[in-house]
Image (tube, rainbow, N blue to C red):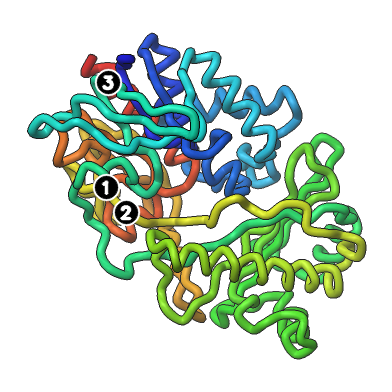
Amino acid sequence: MSYDVVIAGGGAAGCSAAYNLGINGKKVLLIEKNNYLGGLMTGGLVTPFMKSSDNQINTSFGSRFKTEMKKYNAVITYEDGNDGWFNPEYAKIVLDKLMNEASVEVRFDTVITSANIDNNYIRDITLSSKMLSERIKSRYYIDATGNCDFAKKINCEFINKKDEFQSLNLRFIMSNVDIEKFAKWILEFDNDRDVTTVCCVNDEIHMSTAYTWDTNKKWALDPLFKQAVDDGILKNEDRNYFQVFTIPKMPGSIAFNCPRIYTKNVIDPLNNLEYTASLKSGRESILRLSNFCVKYLKGFENAYISSIADMLGIRVSRRLKGKYIFTIDNIKSGRTFEHPVLISNYPIDVHSVKNNQSVLEKVNKEYQMPVEAMISADYDNLFTAGRCVSADFYAQAAIRIIPSCMSMAEGLAKYILELS
């Protein structure tokens, strides 16, 4: 079999690249190791989108996704203007539909096991699944696996350094929550509208609130978390991060952007032993946090855990060395480029399990990322998209969000179309 482009990884970036190439007539194969598309935004329960610049470029895939989701009332616009509050289960269905619309061939439960290399050119690859193994040819390849799994197999050079990792989390959902009761109570309990907000959309109550154990800010929920530790409901490390959101088309359910996996040393998400231990630790913490919610938060009296993410929330791992390394200085200076794939103003966002060590640094101006940060320095026909692009640690911390991954991948697709 022969294709114009083979894409490894069906997350936000991989789907965006595939759709934009397929809808423009390219023969595209999208390979996904799981049994659904969306990656962290579906299997990882990473909802909602983070809000970025109003001047984003390469937004057609994100817009098409939201348009289709609206048909099922599975996405809303929150009061702050963020139109990316979405339902992760409906997203699986919609992403399948969009790939069909663009005539993208999708292979689930499939990985690349080897590649035939000729100097600095990838000639063909071998795909493997539970059912078959076959050799595939393509003109171009995109590694959108998040961890650069394909690039690792063909010995690409990476720019990540030892211990340059962010904390991991394991998201979950609780259902049978009396959201009206919870929303009314939390609004009275916390008057900080930078932390706790509530609005009504499509006759549904939607809300968000948060807490961390950092002491550089006063958190309304702090006394409850400390009391829960004293009562033996929580461990102290469970206090390190807590954030919740409602979910469209899922009344009575709350999505948790936690727990943040606590360890004394930095966790390497590429180490299978550490990854496995983190999953176990995360599920134990989820049980404690759910018990905390039932006992201390109004509206959760009859709530229960209804879903735990299939995968850990990895914010950064391997980063491919590209033709250009995007840097924190590029972001802070607002440097412009000849071939930008992304415009954003999302802050530099680094999560740490240590008290007062997390970073959420706003940027003074919009910044751009160039397509050259997505072009492999080792192979002429290899590209990357998503969190594993060629960027230093702090720059990557600003561009790893879902809307940016979709935009950069769409920009890359346009670049490949021009090459063709």
Q: Please name the residue that numbered disc 1 is placed on.
A: 152
Q: Earlier in the sequence, mark 1 or mark 3?
A: 3
Q: CA distance from mark 2 to mark 1?
A: 9 Å
- Secondary structure type for disc 3: strand
Q: Earlier in the sequence, mark 3 or mark 2?
A: 3
Residue placed at 59% from the left, 70% from the top?
281
Question: Is residue 166 placed above or below 159 in the rendered structure?
Answer: below
Residue placed at 72% from the left, 52% from the top?
307
Q: Which of label 3 and label 2 is nearer to you?
A: 3
- Can you give x and y, in whole percent of width and height, for residue 387 in the image? 38, 47
- Can you give x and y, in whole percent of width and height, for residue 110 in the image? 45, 33
- Secondary structure type for disc 1: helix
Question: Is residue 310 placed above or below 94 in the rendered structure?
Answer: below
Q: CA distance from mark 1 to mark 3?
A: 19 Å
- Can you give x and y, in whole percent of width and height, for residue 396 in the image? 35, 53
Q: CA distance from mark 3 to mark 2?
A: 24 Å
